[in-house]
Amino acid sequence: MTATTAAVLILVLLLFFGLLAIRLHVGLSLMSAAFVGVLLLRGTGAATSTVASMPFSTSASYSLTIIPLFILMGVFAVRAGLAQAGFDLASAVLKRLPGGPALASLAGSGMFAAVTGSSVATVATMARVSTDAIVRAGYGIKLAAGVVCAGGTLGVLIPPSIVLVLYGVVTEESIGQLLLAGVGPGLLTIAVYAVTIVGLVSWQRRRHASTLVRSERGAAGVGAPAGERAASGASGVPTAPAAEPAPAPGPPRLDLVGFLYLVVIFAVSIGTIYLGVATPTEAASFGALAAMVILLLRTRPPAWMRAVGESLSEAVGLTAMTFLLMAGAGVFTYFLALTGASTELVGWVLEADLPPYLALVLCLLLLLPLGMFLDGISMILIAAPLLHPILVGYGFDGIWLGVLIVKVAEMALVTPPVGMNAFVYSGAVREAGLGRVFRGIVPFIVADIVVVALLITFPDITTWLPTMSGTQ
């Protein structure tokens, strides 16, 4: 790479982050910065032809049809109330466990994230309702913030995951195997998060009980009779009877049929991939069709056209946003290839002959700073074409790598100082305060580190389901 090319590369990167700082859409920021880079390196004609042709060539692929189908399936499911049905059922089943509302919020966030495919959208949707339920049960708002922000990340692993689909597209790995590979790590993440919640709640209860005992001993007064100490405050004056607690809202109406419908959609879309009877694109179309039929069954006939029309409109908007990111990333990737930076980076890392697992950890750590500026989809579109060839060159399995990279990319959205999920939550629940939100997230970051360590130590957690399935 010449000095001129290196200077242009630095200028383009600075321009990209500057455009992000003024809140220009990520896809447009990528495209605009890359346009300037190609303009400086190859001239006006090459720059305009690149911007004109690359978005089409990036998106004109049959394998990408799975994305709007999965998005449509998720929109239909949400509008049919299926994710809410799952959340209500989890609330009823888990309410007697330590931290029951927090565990229910975790389950609900996982269901919302799985059907929407968006971490940020899940946090925005679940923030208010989950926080109210958790705080009303007597737990702190920090716990609510951590549960909601971390729970939103579950959608990147639990299929159908748009992020895993995009990873398969940009790296040419099997999309079907990637979707199946996310099941084991997704369930492991839920289990570790649940253990974290129960541990936090138990610790808070023990600390509260210890504080209460100390305060009662201090307020009782030395030498007071036992009965008087129990009924008196620090001054020896009997305390007023406690006010009647406000009646809690009634339990949610359980919608078992809605939850079963949710299971049906999952079985249709993912089960057919596992059995090898349908390609991922065909399975996505089956899932979207099943979700639409369920929406019609759960909607009164006069509102059918409005329900379907609004769902299609929302799905088109989400699909357009995703493809705009892809178009911008395609132009930016072309610019990086033009500079030779991506090739030189791959060659440099491979020639360094680092221990394979050290190279893996270093590559995964590179994703964390990106979470300060980008969402999970953008990170994968930018980073996966660079990291995948490096780590495959060290002999790692591509499917296993895909799940690890996607997992760490979504971790970046809850990592201080600029985790996007934390800002979305603090905007939705303003009384939380950004400082308390980040403090609530810390235990779940530790849990994520444990999950990543387990996935690295035991690769079979990721690879067992794709190996057993009939998909290619």
Image (tube, rainbow, N blue to C red):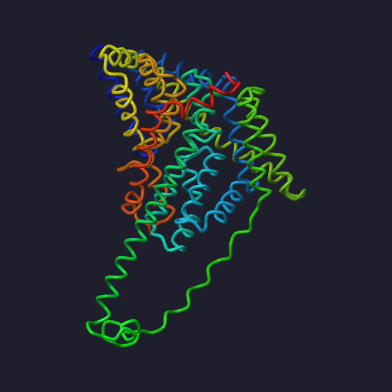
Total marks shown come to 0
Q: Residue furthest right?
A: 301
Provide residue 22's location: percent of width, then percent of height. Answer: 35, 39
Tell me if residue 419 can be seen. no
Q: Residue at x 36, y 47 (%)?
A: 441
Q: Is residue 93 left or right of residue 199?
A: right
Q: Residue at x 45, y 32 (%)?
A: 377
Q: Is residue 214 above or below residue 47?
A: below
Residue 290 locus on image (x, y percent): 69, 36
The quarter of the image holding the N terminus is top left
Residues 415 and 33: in front is: 415
Viewer-side residue, 455 vs 116: 455
| In front of the other: 311 or 403 | 403
Q: Quadrant of residue 289?
A: top right
Quadrant of the image occupied by residue 346: top left
Quarter occupied by the C terminus: top right
Q: Residue furthest bottom?
A: 237
Query: Residue 330 placed where, x, y %?
Result: 45, 21
In this view, 286 is above or below 396? below
**Residue 455: image location, x then y, percent:** 40, 30
User: Residue at 71% of width from left, 48% of height from top?
Assistant: 298
Whether residue 461 is visible to the viewer of this picture, yes or no, is yes
Left or right of 293, for residue 111: left
